[in-house]
Amino acid sequence: MSQFFQIHPENPQARLIKQAVEIIRNGGVVVYPTDSSYAIGCAMGNKAGIERIRRLRQLDDKHNFTLACRDLSQLGLFAKVDTVAFRLLKTHLPGPYTIILNATREVPRMLLHPKRRTIGLRVPAQPIAQALLAELGEPLMSVSLILPGESEPMSDPYEMRDALEHQVDLIIDGGYGGVEASTVISLVDGEPEVLRVGCGDPQPFMA
């Protein structure tokens, strides 16, 4: 039976954030809001948690996992960021974008794309997500909360509780979420390539 925390979307209660991070550190799988849609995540070294998320989402081993990072300096530990990419990221992050970059050795192998050493990275501009990441002190392994057979992320925390209360350890209710996932942009080869258009406008990256 999962726990259900109601956390204020703009002024997250520190006590509940600390409790949520304890659940993550103890191997928990958590549903939490981002600036695009709700996501499901766990600590990036939590192999059992990652496998639970794979099964829940029915993901194959070619799915690019995402590391949600607190800021650009943390992102830079896990991805190779050249000058051009850094300028783009500094201009547009935090925001509702997932950026695909070449990974550094800091990224656990189980999170990497099997053929290319790439990783998706996010810096979400959402107070609950930011508070979780600040308290955790490391990125959260995340994917959008899109259930098998659905095309849009779940947005109602009470529906999430009904559907997932036996499959995750914590659901954070931060109000209704968006119904579009993040926009995915690859900067692997230097030139921005839009892989998925979501709630973030891709045009600024292409200018």
Image (cartoon, rainbow, N blue to C red):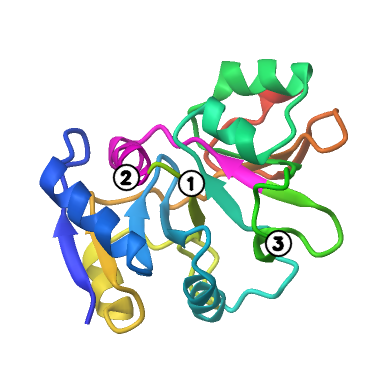
- CB-based contact (under 8 Å), mark 1 and mark 3: no
39 vs 77: above or below: below
Q: Which residue is mark 2?
A: 132
Question: Is 168 above or below relative to 110?
Answer: below
Q: Measuring 32% from the left and 67% from the top, which residue is drawn there?
A: 26
**Residue 37 position in % (x across, y down):** 42, 50
Q: Amino acid at mark 1?
A: Pro
Q: Magenta region: which residues?
A: 120-136
Residue that badge 3 annotates:
109
Mark 1 lies on a secondary structure that is loop
Helix, strand or loop under label 3: helix
Q: CA distance from mark 2 to mark 3?
A: 24 Å
Toward which corner of the image does residue 29 lie, by quadrant? Answer: bottom left
Q: Residue at x 77, y 18 (%)?
A: 84
Task: Work out whether residue 16 or residue 22 is closer to the camera in this orientation and state it.
Answer: 22
Instruction: Give the numbered dot on residue 139.
Output: 1
Q: In this image, 69 relative to 61: left or right?
A: left
| First along the sequence among labels 2 and 1 | 2
Q: Amino acid at mark 2?
A: Leu
